[in-house]
Amino acid sequence: MDNEMFSRMTEMSQNAWKPFVELGEITTRAMERAGQQQMTLINEALQDSARYTQNFTDVKDVKELVELQSRLMTEVSEKLFSVARQNVDNAMQTGSELSKWFETSINIQAAVKPAVRSAARKSA
Protein backbone atom coordinates (compact mmCIF):
# COMPACT_ATOMS: atom_id res chain seq x y z
CA MET A 1 0.00 0.00 0.00
CA ASP A 2 2.83 2.39 0.82
CA ASN A 3 4.52 1.61 -2.49
CA GLU A 4 1.29 2.30 -4.36
CA MET A 5 0.81 5.60 -2.56
CA PHE A 6 4.45 6.54 -3.19
CA SER A 7 4.03 5.70 -6.89
CA ARG A 8 0.89 7.83 -7.11
CA MET A 9 2.54 10.75 -5.36
CA THR A 10 5.55 10.48 -7.69
CA GLU A 11 3.27 10.43 -10.73
CA MET A 12 1.27 13.40 -9.45
CA SER A 13 4.46 15.33 -8.80
CA GLN A 14 5.74 14.65 -12.31
CA ASN A 15 2.39 15.65 -13.79
CA ALA A 16 2.37 18.83 -11.72
CA TRP A 17 5.68 19.96 -13.27
CA LYS A 18 4.68 19.10 -16.82
CA PRO A 19 2.70 22.34 -17.46
CA PHE A 20 5.61 24.47 -16.24
CA VAL A 21 8.00 22.71 -18.59
CA GLU A 22 5.58 23.23 -21.47
CA LEU A 23 5.19 26.90 -20.56
CA GLY A 24 8.96 27.27 -20.64
CA GLU A 25 9.06 25.66 -24.09
CA ILE A 26 6.37 28.03 -25.41
CA THR A 27 8.26 31.02 -24.03
CA THR A 28 11.51 29.77 -25.53
CA ARG A 29 9.94 29.35 -28.98
CA ALA A 30 8.44 32.85 -28.81
CA MET A 31 11.77 34.37 -27.84
CA GLU A 32 13.58 32.45 -30.60
CA ARG A 33 11.11 33.75 -33.20
CA ALA A 34 11.49 37.32 -31.93
CA GLY A 35 15.28 37.04 -31.81
CA GLN A 36 15.48 35.65 -35.33
CA GLN A 37 13.25 38.42 -36.60
CA GLN A 38 15.41 41.07 -34.91
CA MET A 39 18.60 39.58 -36.36
CA THR A 40 17.08 39.59 -39.83
CA LEU A 41 15.98 43.20 -39.41
CA ILE A 42 19.42 44.30 -38.21
CA ASN A 43 21.18 42.53 -41.09
CA GLU A 44 18.84 44.12 -43.64
CA ALA A 45 19.29 47.54 -42.04
CA LEU A 46 23.07 47.26 -42.25
CA GLN A 47 22.95 46.13 -45.88
CA ASP A 48 20.51 48.91 -46.78
CA SER A 49 22.63 51.47 -44.96
CA ALA A 50 25.70 50.52 -46.97
CA ARG A 51 23.71 50.55 -50.22
CA TYR A 52 22.14 53.94 -49.52
CA THR A 53 25.47 55.44 -48.47
CA GLN A 54 26.89 54.38 -51.82
CA ASN A 55 23.85 55.81 -53.63
CA PHE A 56 24.17 59.15 -51.82
CA THR A 57 27.73 59.54 -53.07
CA ASP A 58 26.48 59.17 -56.65
CA VAL A 59 23.88 61.96 -56.36
CA LYS A 60 24.45 64.84 -58.78
CA ASP A 61 21.79 67.37 -57.82
CA VAL A 62 19.11 68.19 -55.24
CA LYS A 63 16.28 66.68 -57.27
CA GLU A 64 18.10 63.32 -57.39
CA LEU A 65 18.78 63.55 -53.65
CA VAL A 66 15.08 64.15 -52.87
CA GLU A 67 14.06 61.23 -55.11
CA LEU A 68 16.60 58.96 -53.44
CA GLN A 69 15.44 59.96 -49.96
CA SER A 70 11.81 59.46 -50.97
CA ARG A 71 12.58 55.99 -52.29
CA LEU A 72 14.54 55.23 -49.12
CA MET A 73 11.65 56.28 -46.88
CA THR A 74 9.18 54.20 -48.90
CA GLU A 75 11.36 51.10 -48.63
CA VAL A 76 12.00 51.61 -44.92
CA SER A 77 8.32 52.12 -44.13
CA GLU A 78 7.41 48.98 -46.11
CA LYS A 79 9.99 46.96 -44.18
CA LEU A 80 8.82 48.33 -40.85
CA PHE A 81 5.21 47.52 -41.74
CA SER A 82 6.30 43.98 -42.64
CA VAL A 83 8.13 43.63 -39.32
CA ALA A 84 5.10 44.92 -37.43
CA ARG A 85 2.93 42.36 -39.22
CA GLN A 86 5.39 39.58 -38.32
CA ASN A 87 5.30 40.73 -34.69
CA VAL A 88 1.51 40.49 -34.69
CA ASP A 89 1.67 37.03 -36.28
CA ASN A 90 4.21 35.88 -33.68
CA ALA A 91 2.09 37.27 -30.86
CA MET A 92 -1.01 35.53 -32.21
CA GLN A 93 0.86 32.23 -32.56
CA THR A 94 2.20 32.52 -29.01
CA GLY A 95 -1.29 33.42 -27.75
CA SER A 96 -2.72 30.35 -29.43
CA GLU A 97 -0.03 28.14 -27.90
CA LEU A 98 -0.65 29.66 -24.47
CA SER A 99 -4.38 29.12 -24.80
CA LYS A 100 -3.86 25.43 -25.60
CA TRP A 101 -1.37 25.18 -22.73
CA PHE A 102 -3.87 26.74 -20.31
CA GLU A 103 -6.64 24.34 -21.34
CA THR A 104 -4.30 21.36 -20.97
CA SER A 105 -3.12 22.61 -17.56
CA ILE A 106 -6.70 22.96 -16.35
CA ASN A 107 -7.47 19.41 -17.52
CA ILE A 108 -4.40 18.03 -15.72
CA GLN A 109 -5.33 19.88 -12.56
CA ALA A 110 -8.89 18.55 -12.75
CA ALA A 111 -7.53 15.02 -13.10
CA VAL A 112 -5.06 15.38 -10.23
CA LYS A 113 -7.54 16.63 -7.59
CA PRO A 114 -9.56 13.39 -7.37
CA ALA A 115 -6.36 11.34 -7.24
CA VAL A 116 -5.07 13.46 -4.36
CA ARG A 117 -8.35 13.11 -2.49
CA SER A 118 -8.35 9.37 -3.07
CA ALA A 119 -4.77 9.02 -1.83
CA ALA A 120 -5.57 11.14 1.23
CA ARG A 121 -8.61 8.99 2.09
CA LYS A 122 -6.61 5.77 1.73
CA SER A 123 -3.83 7.01 3.95
CA ALA A 124 -6.24 8.19 6.66
Image: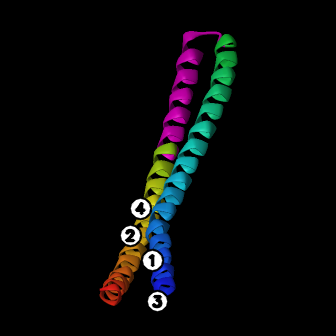
* Labelled disc at residue 9: 1
Query: Cα distance, mark 4 to mark 1?
Result: 32 Å
Q: Position of residue 21 (x, y in %)?
A: 51, 62
Q: Position of residue 77 (x, y in %)?
A: 48, 36
Here the colouring is rainbow
Specify which label sits upstream in the sequence, 4 or 3: 3
- Residues at badges 4 and 1 in contact (C-beta under 8 Å)? no
Q: Residues within 10 Å of mark 4 (few under 14, many from 20)?
A: some
Q: Quadrant of residue 19?
A: bottom left
Q: Quadrant of residue 50?
A: top right
Q: Measured along the vertical axis of the image, is residue 10 above or below residue 75? A: below
Residue occupying image coordinates x 60% and y 10%:
61
Q: Secondary structure at mark 2?
A: helix
Q: Which residue is mark 3?
A: 1
- Residues at badges 2 and 1 in contact (C-beta under 8 Å)? no
| Range drawn in magenta | 59-82
Q: Which residue is mark 2?
A: 102
Nearer the observer, disc 3 or disc 1?
3
Q: Which residue is mark 4?
A: 95
Q: Measured along the vertical axis of the image, is residue 3 above or below residue 56? A: below
Q: Nearer the viewer, residue 61 or 90?
A: 90
Query: Cα distance, mark 2 to mark 1?
Result: 23 Å
Residue occupying image coordinates x 35% and y 89%:
122
Q: Amino acid at mark 4?
A: Gly
Q: Residues within 10 Å of mark 3 (few under 14, many from 20)?
A: few
Nearer the observer, disc 2 or disc 1?
1
Query: Cα distance, mark 4 to mark 2?
Result: 10 Å
Q: Amino acid at mark 1?
A: Met
Nearer the observer, disc 4 or disc 3?
3
Q: Is residue 62 magenta?
A: yes
